[in-house]
Image (cartoon, rainbow, N blue to C red):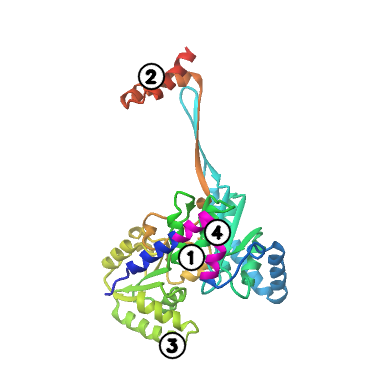
Amino acid sequence: MASLERDVEIERNTEATVGRILADVRREGLQAVFRHTESFDGVRLDSRTFRIPRAVMDEALARLRREQGPLIRDLEGMADGIRRFAEAQRAVLADVDLALPGGGRAQERWVPLRTAGVYIPGGRAFYPSTLAMTVIPAQVAGVSRIVGVTPPRPEGPDPLVLATAALLGLEELYTVGGAQAVAWLAYGEPAVDIVTGPGNRFVAEAKRQLVGRCGIDSVAGPTEVLILADGSADPAWLAEDLLAQAEHDPDAAAVLVSEDRSLLERVAQVLAARVAASPRKAILETSLSRFGRLIEAPRELAIAFAQAWAPEHLELVVRDPEAWLPELTTAGAIFNGGCSAESFGDYGAGPNHVLPTGRTARYSSPLGVQTYLKRQSILSLDAALAAELAPQVGRLADAEQLHHHAASARLRAAHHA
């Protein structure tokens, strides 16, 4: 089986290119942002065209209501689904408040980040769904300033993205993309606390290099799906689910593993027919030839492969998916059962569709309300408890040769005496 590993030389070139862009933006500010936008996107920006006025977003929403009322209702339904799940996430994040014997409290509370930058992809297609997936959890978390960026187009911003931004109440949206957009979010006037949202390899690399300057949700590169299936699965469903990921990007990975050889053969036949007839044929042919796989393997090996790869999306299309779940812990998101196609997750059925890729799902989580919150601890000691603890603290500090730690604690004990 050919490797699913990404090209190392491409990764090195991407790292170097992004490093230069970040350095330029840090040094020159918006002038570097505009210069790189013209170079990469062929669009000339200036301070007047950079920010999209709220009136333009409102006008796009009003036009969409007049011309495509059912689509507006679909967008509202998607947003409602995302918001319900985000609110449920927030509801279970309890603060900690522990009474200390002797007089005092040890506490921990969840507090929202102050500013967030959300990246809405727009290279080969524009994604109002991603705008909703990134903005709504930030709103539910209580982030006070949310700044959106989306790649520019010569013909102007995508009307559906503008309408969605207005529908969500987003106040700030800028027409800029790529590594230069991420750099501006971190180094520019927003100086955001966190950058979230998926993008191409340049966006992902920019986020990676900016860790420490600001937070990120995850390093989200090209999309991935792994489907584990048995003979109960419908070949047409499986083929369409593979194509649903492959159509995103020539670098997308779409893999099916089953021990049923006949199923794999039927899926291959359906794939060939669907690709030939698809309006996205060029992208599908490239991604499937590079990172598309149909693999015959027994259950044990399929699970081992899933655990090692830690795919962004994992579909379980088997007779008893619940029996498989305990062993599958590394995937970003699991779609449990044949009816739970990944496409439902993309459009507001519940969990967020912004997910870790490139094996980072081993230790990273889906974007959610928690992404835009941080935990803060609070320690409140009464004088009597401080005096009681001081000898212990002093001895431990002395053992580590941190003499002023010891003195600081002992002063409290002396004062109480």
> Which residue does the image show at 44% across and 52% down from the upper left?
211
Name which quarter of the figure residue 156 lies in. Answer: bottom right
Residue 118 tag number:
4
Q: Magenta stretch: give its range.
A: 20-39
Under mark 1, the amino acid is Gly
Residue 48 in sight in this render: yes
Q: Secondary structure at mark 3?
A: helix
Q: Which residue is mark 3?
A: 276
Instruction: Please say if the residues under marks 1 and 4 sit with CB atoms less than 8 Å apart.
Output: no
Mark 2 or 1, nearer chain start: 1
Q: Secondary structure at mark 1?
A: loop
Under mark 2, the amino acid is Pro
- Residue closer to the observer: 376 or 46: 46
Q: Quadrant of the N terminus?
A: bottom left
Mark 1 or 4, nearer chain start: 4
Marks 3 and 1, how far apart at CA: 27 Å
Q: Secondary structure at mark 4?
A: strand
- Residue closer to the observer: 89 or 317: 89
* Residue at the top extreme of this rendering: 417
Q: Which residue is mark 2?
A: 391
Mark 4 or 3, nearer chain start: 4
Q: Which residue is mark 1?
A: 199
Marks 2 and 3, how far apart at CA: 78 Å
Marks 2 and 1, how far apart at CA: 54 Å
Marks 4 and 2, how far apart at CA: 49 Å
The magenta stretch spans residue 252: no
Under mark 3, the amino acid is Ala
Q: Would you say 61 lies left or right of 271 here?
A: right
